[in-house]
Image (cartoon, rainbow, N blue to C red):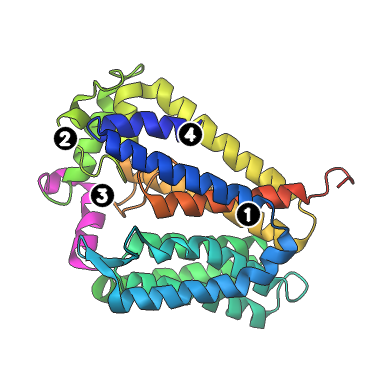
Amino acid sequence: MLSGISLIVLYSAGGENEDLLIKHGIRGGFAFLLMLLFARIPPTILSRWSIHLYLAGLALLFIVLGVGIIGKGAQRWIDLGLFRFQPAEIMKIGVPMMVAWVLTRSPLPARPVFLMLAILVVLVPAVLVILQPDLGTALLIALTGIVVIFLAGISWKLIISVVFILASAAPVMWAFVLHDYQRRRVLTLFDPWSDPLGAGYHTIQSIIAIGSGGVGGKGWLSGTQSQLEFIPERSTDFIFAVFAEEFGLIGILILLALYLFLIIRGLLIAFYAQDTYSRLLAGGLSTTFFFYVFVNIGMVSGILPVVGVPLPLLSYGGTSMVTLMIGFGILMSISNNRNFLGRR
């Protein structure tokens, strides 16, 4: 249903561009086949593949830094002729798989040495993605691993200590890590009208679109903010604003209900998983899927900074869709091998 909604909204957001729709449909079909393929792979084999997928992802990230395509001020893609893809997306699957593999090398809760190794597994790809630079994707990659570490069970003292360290490091990151445009995005979060034609433009236009949709929406192909091209990146990061303007509050509630169903279903699969690796991986994938949805909608509605995160299953983008469908395939695989009330 979400993929079907995506085709409907993309047709409107893309200015009734049929070529865009056909490309998205082909990519969606390919991603769907990959989902079915991964659904047939047992979790035991996925566990053995974890380190290989992770190392392959790291190698691709190094290649991107060397010969990657530069677009919109960032070096994030590899061109393979027929298509190009973003290797950072692979790590959204590779990192949680590798962290789950590391943490299951010993009984849980994990010993400090395994926790440190898991944190290293998260930090290396996150830093490589920051160098592209792509802070939004780096944070999401880090989040996929942190969620798995949290689900493995760690003490509240350690959690509080990490939060304190991150809070202490915030001024250093603000001064030396964040780029000027990233700092402007954070500042305009609190007052987008301070720079209405610059850093605040995206937020202002998306908020206008969401608000003007009202309860029932303006109707398909009838959103003024989207059709008159006031909304930037309306086929990718800001597609939620297009959807909200055309389908209103009722459409938003239906969309959120579909997302909530997927998240709850994934958490149930994690609850009934047959082993610790499967439980951690399923829980991590389901929880991070929630964060992807929350970050994008929060960004578009003006409660989070603009970080360039697509809306799962709705935004245009091949690599992102492939990654999501592979994640769903892994969840299906874990579900097929679960223990449900004592039965296989």
User: For numbered disc 4, what is the local secondary structure?
Assistant: helix
In this rendering, the label closer to the viewer, 2 or 3: 2
Determine which quarter of the picture holds residue 227: top left
Kind of residue at badge 4: Leu
Which of the two discs, 4 and 1, labels the residue nearer the N terminus? 4
Q: Earlier in the sequence, mark 3 or mark 4?
A: 4
Front-lying residue, 254 or 207: 254
User: Within 10 angstroms of label 3, few (less than 14), some, or many (20 or more) residues?
Assistant: some
Sequence-earlier tag: 2 or 4: 4
Q: Describe the element under mark 3 as helix, strand or loop.
A: helix
Q: Residue at x 48, y 63 (%)?
A: 90
Pick the residue in front: 165 or 78. 78
Gap between marks 2 and 4 measured at Cα: 24 Å
Q: CA distance from mark 3 to mark 4?
A: 29 Å
Identified by mark 2, the residue type is Glu
Label 1: state its secondary structure. helix
In the picture, the disc for residue 229 is 2
On the question of residue 157 being in view, the answer is no
Q: Residue 135, located in which quarter of the rendered image? A: bottom left
Dot 4, how many residues are within 10 Å of its Cα: few (below 14), some (14-19), or many (20+)? Answer: few
**Residue under pointer 1:** 38
- Mark positioned earlier in the residue sequence (1 or 3): 1
Residue at which label 3 appears: 189
Q: Position of residue 171 (x, y in %)?
A: 30, 72
Q: Nearer the viewer, mark 3 or mark 4?
A: 4
For the residue marked with disc 1, what is the amino acid? Phe
Q: Residues within 10 Å of mark 1 (few under 14, many from 20)?
A: many
**Residue nearest the viewer, comparing 131 with 28:** 28
The magenta stretch spans which residues? 179-197
**Residue in the image at 50% along x and 74% along y:** 56
Q: Which residue is mark 4?
A: 2
Q: Would you place residue 163 above or below residue 116 in this image? A: above
